[in-house]
Image (cartoon, grey):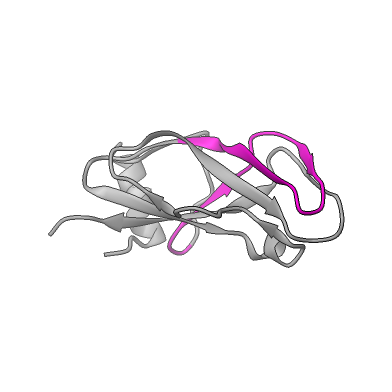
Amino acid sequence: MIYSGIGIKRLITEGKIKIIPESEIKEASIKIHFSKTFTIKPKEFITTLSKETIELPNNIAALYDGYTHLARKGIITHLGSMFVDPGTKGQITFEVFNASDQEITINENDRAGHLIFIDTKE
């Protein structure tokens, strides 16, 4: 089951999911942002972290999905797995690749993408 925005809000209110700082809840996800400003050169690869620290219980996983506005500029924010394991505590690591021919600056607090939450109960 994928949680709706209402379900995500309930999980946060009940303390089952923790997100610091508080993030905007969308229809079925939360927005997630970059933690620092950086400039990435054409065809360069770097890793960086999310501004948000998350804490998931053992029965809820998350999927990270990149922001299409960045993709249209040639910025890919995950090259590995988009899966965030149940029980995760910490920031999300972004694997950022600039597929364009232009240097691009990403600012602290720019939106990287969103997290979708999934119930892993059988």
Coordinates of residue 4 in the picture (x, y in percent): 37, 62
Write the residue at 32% across / 45% down: 85
Write the residue at 56% across / 47% down: 32
Quadrant in which the C terminus is drawn? bottom left
Coordinates of residue 23 in the picture (x, y in percent): 52, 44
The question of residue 75 being in magenta is answered with no
Q: Is residue 56 left or right of residue 35?
A: left
Write the residue at 43% across / 62% down: 28
Q: Quadrant of residue 57?
A: top left
Coordinates of residue 49 in the picture (x, y in percent): 58, 36
Taking 58 as reference, is 111 above or below it?
A: below
Number of marks present in the image shown: 0
The question of residue 44 being in magenta is answered with yes
Q: Is residue 57 left or right of residue 47?
A: left
Q: Residue furthest right?
A: 102
Q: Quadrant of residue 63?
A: bottom left
Q: Residue furthest front?
A: 43
Taking 20 as reference, is 4 above or below it?
A: below
Q: Nearer the viewer, residue 80 or 5?
A: 80
Q: Is residue 97 left or right of residue 62?
A: right
Quadrant in which the N terminus is drawn? bottom left
Q: Point out the stretch of residues depicted in magenta.
A: 27-53
Coordinates of residue 65 in the picture (x, y in percent): 52, 59
Q: Is residue 44 left or right of residue 50?
A: right
Taking 31 as reference, is 35 above or below it?
A: above
Write the residue at 53% across / 40% down: 93
